[in-house]
């Protein structure tokens, strides 16, 4: 699919010393009708997707993630294997459909819930990568990292203001908030996250969220998502996101170990 670059972005990837475009990223070519038109210069090719990804701040650790390399049949032991594979397959299908239809009929984001290593971030990043690759504006933020950056901005010696950190998070078209609830909730953190989610909700912006915390934990002693983020945020997420619960074993532990030892 072709999409049009915004002019300033093209200048960012253009070769600074390009003889064709002089580093602007645009060159003029003759049209069939005898006119002239500006087209992206060849020196910007190849760098585009990389740039889109860098702008979206997708960590190198997740750069490889896409739908094609998301395995949905890695569970092969025990009575639950078929059920787990179904859960993976369904999760991938829902996220892929979301991407295919975006932005039509997607007033909801996605909330991917499940235990460690079940591919929640992998799927969410696959979606974000596909969307920014298509020219949508998106941003990856780890939940703890975001709170840390905001907090650091309060320091009088900080180079950035709170608003400089918050603005892109509030305004980006698609936000991926990874590992929601990962840190112990302070009143301040809940207030901040509540504000971000509310603002995005009111502006009808899509948010993709991943979390380890379930509504009904697998073990009684574990926290629920509401324990980690408060009832108000949990309830807001119901309105904002379609919930996808992944039930499967840890891919990192089970699959990687099996492949390296056997
Ligand atoms: N079904 C899968 N197919 C291929 N790779 C996978 C699959 N599930 C997970 N992985 C890989 O395993 C690693 C862990 O997955 P990921 O980070 O997405 O898990 P997670 O559910 O977000 O875990 P956590 O709760 O710890 O954040 C990643 O490198 C990811 O690419
Ligand atoms: Mg994750
Ligand atoms: Zn050029």
Image (cartoon, helix red, strand yellow):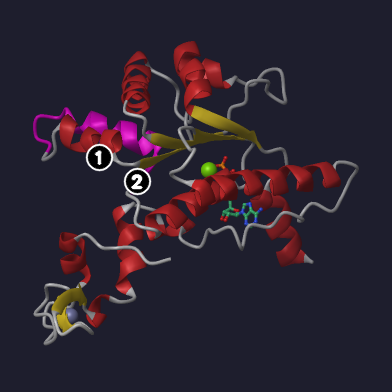
Q: Residue 14 occupies which quadrant of the picture?
A: bottom left
Looking at the image, the residue that sits furthest to the right is 79
Q: Which image quarter holds the C terminus? A: bottom right
Mark 1 CB within 8 Å of ligand 2: no
**Nearer-the-camera pick, 33 or 179:** 33
Q: Residues within 10 Å of mark 1 (few under 14, many from 20)?
A: few
Spot occupied by residue 166 in the image (x, y as percentages of width and height) = 24, 33
Label 1: which residue?
Answer: 168
Q: Quadrant of ligand 3?
A: bottom left
Spot occupied by residue 229 in the image (x, y as percentages of width and height) = 47, 19
Question: Does dot 2 land on a helix, a strand or a loop?
Answer: strand
Label 2: which residue?
Answer: 139
Q: Which image quarter holds the N terminus? A: bottom left
**Nearer-the-camera pick, 188 or 82:** 82
Left or right relative to 254: residue 63: left
Looking at the image, the residue that sits furthest to the front is 33
187 is higher (above) or lower (below) than 149:
above
Spot occupied by residue 96 in the image (x, y as percentages of width and height) = 58, 50
Looking at the image, is mark 1 or mark 2 earlier in the sequence? 2
Residue in view at x 76 percent, y 60 percent? 258
Residue 118 visible in this rendered orientation of the protein: no
Magenta highlight on residue 223? no
Image: magenta residue range: 138-158
Spot occupied by residue 30 in the image (x, y as percentages of width and height) = 17, 85
């Amino acid at each position: 699919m072709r999409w049009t670059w915004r002019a300033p972005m093209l200048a960012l990837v253009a070769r600074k010393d390009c003889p064709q475009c002089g580093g602007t990223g645009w060159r003029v070519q003759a049209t069939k009708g005898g006119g002239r038109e500006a087209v992206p210069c060849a020196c910007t090719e190849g760098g585009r997707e990389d740039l889109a990804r860098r702008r979206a701040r997708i960590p190198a650790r997740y750069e490889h993630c896409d739908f094609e390399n998301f395995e949905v049949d890695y569970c092969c032991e025990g009575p639950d294997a078929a059920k787990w594979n179904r859960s993976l397959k369904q999760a991938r299908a829902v996220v892929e459909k979301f991407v295919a239809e975006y932005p039509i009929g997607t007033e909801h984001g996605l909330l991917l819930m499940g235990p460690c290593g079940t591919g929640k971030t992998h799927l969410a990043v696959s979606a974000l990568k596909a969307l920014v690759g298509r020219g949508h504006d998106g941003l990856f933020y780890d939940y703890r990292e975001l709170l840390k950056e905001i907090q650091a901005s309060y320091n009088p010696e900080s180079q950035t203001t709170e608003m400089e950190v918050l603005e892109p998070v509030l305004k980006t078209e698609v936000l991926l908030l990874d590992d929601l609830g990962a840190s112990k909730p302070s009143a301040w953190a809940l207030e901040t996250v509540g504000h971000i989610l509310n603002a995005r909700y009111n502006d009808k912006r899509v948010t993709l969220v991943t979390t380890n915390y379930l509504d009904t934990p697998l073990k009684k002693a574990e926290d629920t998502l509401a324990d980690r983020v408060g009832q108000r945020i949990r309830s807001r997420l119901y309105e904002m996101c379609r919930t996808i619960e992944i039930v499967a074993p840890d891919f990192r532990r089970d699959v990687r170990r099996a492949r390296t030892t056997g």
